[in-house]
Image (spheres, rainbow, N blue to C red):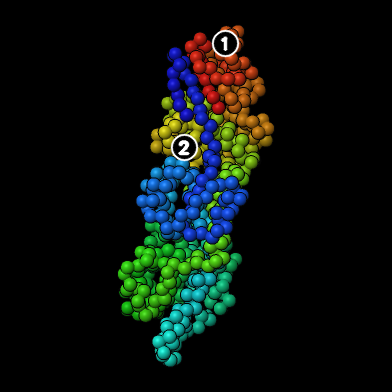
Amino acid sequence: MRVWDVTGSLSLRIRRRRIMSDITRVLISDSLASACAHILRSQGGIEVTESPGLSPQDLLSQIKDYDGLIVRSATKVTADVLTAGSRLKVVGRAGTGVDNVDVDAATKNGIIVMNTPTGNSISAAELTCGLILSLSRQIPQAASSMNQGKWDRKKYMGSELYGKTLGILGLGRIGKEVAIRMQSFQMKTIGYDPIIPPEVTAEFGVQQFSLEEIWGQCDYITVHTPLLPSTTGLINDAAFAKCKRGVQVINCARGGIIDEAALLRALESGQCGGAGLDVFTEEPPRDRALIDHPLVISLPHLGASTHEAQNRCGEEIALQIVDVVKERALMGAVNAPALTKAFAPETKPWIKLGEALGRLLRCLLPKVNGEIQVTTTGGALKNYGSFLCSAVAIGILQDEDKKVNLVNSCIFAKEIGIQVTSRHSGDSAETRLEVSGGGLTLVGGLSGDLPGLIQIGPSRFRSPVSLEGTLLLWTEETNLPKLVEVLAAAGSQLQSFHVSGGYNVAEVSAPLSDLSSLGSCQQISL
């Protein structure tokens, strides 16, 4: 959006931004099932380049030519990559975690980051259960002993899972699947999750406790959380000290959730009786102290390494991107959950209205700052406030040098001192959208799917002003004959004229290059 002066009058031309521009070229930089590329090509009409194993330098040099990037866990999508990808609109992670993607940098660049949260859940859960069983009976160690020609029946005495307590830290999809499976061994399943309510986990047989209450109850502890500052080193020296002596731990989530140095100390002291590790802080790990420990079963990050999971994740991320391209739905968005409903056909006209009202507010108040209040009325808009704030922010922002869209508009607005907030005023019979700021309120609504301006300040128009095409706006009396004369000379026509208190608005068929003869007229192209 840009503001410029034309012989003393203000003219505002606004470039319409879609939720996401066309995605025509996608780079797949990690090994994925062939179904991924096939779906993108056949269902999305997308040109796909498969280049697994790109070096960081090669990725930086090539990413500028692509609208989308699909990765697994090997590719590191850094801030430099996201900045170099000037065309990027979406980064798809074929898997659950996105710790190899700089999500904050993606958001700042207006790039949607999506994952496939269900794609590898079963595979990861089954591997976790396999490690629990392997720990209880020392299966890998006994098998290795046999391969060495030994017969050590007494050395590999194990223990039953029957009646033991399994603590599950993180009770999302994978944690839930682990609980259900291990209950078949008659294990008692308890857990901790700061987000999922206890009544929900009780439905699949997991009683929740605080972390302080969990440590001392468990014979086995498995972690299924993302790697965040709050979960890094979640199981540490202090936690091990509170556990039963001989507790066994499993990590098929992310390296670093269990403090590896603390784990090694606990193993050597006997406080920890064994560990099953599929992930490590450094992959592949150079320090082999844990890998070589006789009580550790270590795997090379195999959680999603099944044919089924790879096919499922590849298919799911491809279908999600096709849905975005077709503007049918947005699934698996990590950094834009508020936009999940923004792709529904019924929401798009309201997004268009929000952008138009934001533009009009900025036109009327060029120095708008502080709080902008977005108010929705009517039951249909009850849950629309979050993404309508983003739409209004797009309209308010006028710097074309920034890639502004629904993903990052509120962030950029906040950087220049504008806080866009929302509220719902109740289930009124009238469905409308209000945008208020700087002492001015604009009210809009829909006529069918067309956005319209209903009111400026206290003054209501007799009929809605169409917020499409080109508008001319005055705050003083308008000379209609003069207007028609100027329009005719410019090859434009007057389509309608609206009066509301101190505001006059004309809808014209084409924009004017010279407004000097129309006084203090503002031109808005929507």
Q: Which percent across, then down, holds residue 477?
A: 56, 11
State the residue at coordinates (45%, 57%).
52
Q: Which percent across, then down, holds residue 2?
A: 45, 26
**How many C-alpha atoms fall within 10 Å of the one at disc 1: few (<14), some, or many (≥20)?**
few
Q: Of tags 1 and 2, which is closer to the observer?
A: 1
In the figure, is residue 83 to the left or right of 198? Answer: left
Q: Which mark is residue 175?
A: none
Q: Can residue 245 be seen from the camera position used here?
A: no
Q: Can residue 221 be seen from the camera position used here?
A: yes
In depth, the one of 48 and 101 nearer the eye is 48
Above or below, 154 against 402 in this view is below
State the residue at coordinates (56%, 47%).
46
Q: Which residue lies under the disc numbered 1?
A: 489
**How many C-alpha atoms fall within 10 Å of the one at disc 2: few (<14), some, or many (≥20)?**
many
Q: Which residue lies under the disc numbered 2?
A: 404
Q: Which percent across, then down, holds residue 316?
A: 57, 56
In the figure, is residue 78 to the left or right of 493? Answer: left
N-term mark: 1 or 2: 2
Q: Which percent across, then down, holds residue 396?
A: 48, 31
> Which picture quadrant has residue 465?
top right
Where disc 2 sits, the SS reads loop
> Which picture quadrant has residue 299?
bottom left
Inter-mark Cα distance, 1 to 2: 36 Å
In depth, the one of 251 and 57 nearer the eye is 57
Above or below, 61 against 167 in this view is above
Above or below, 499 against 298 in this view is above
- Amino acid carrying label 1: it is Ala
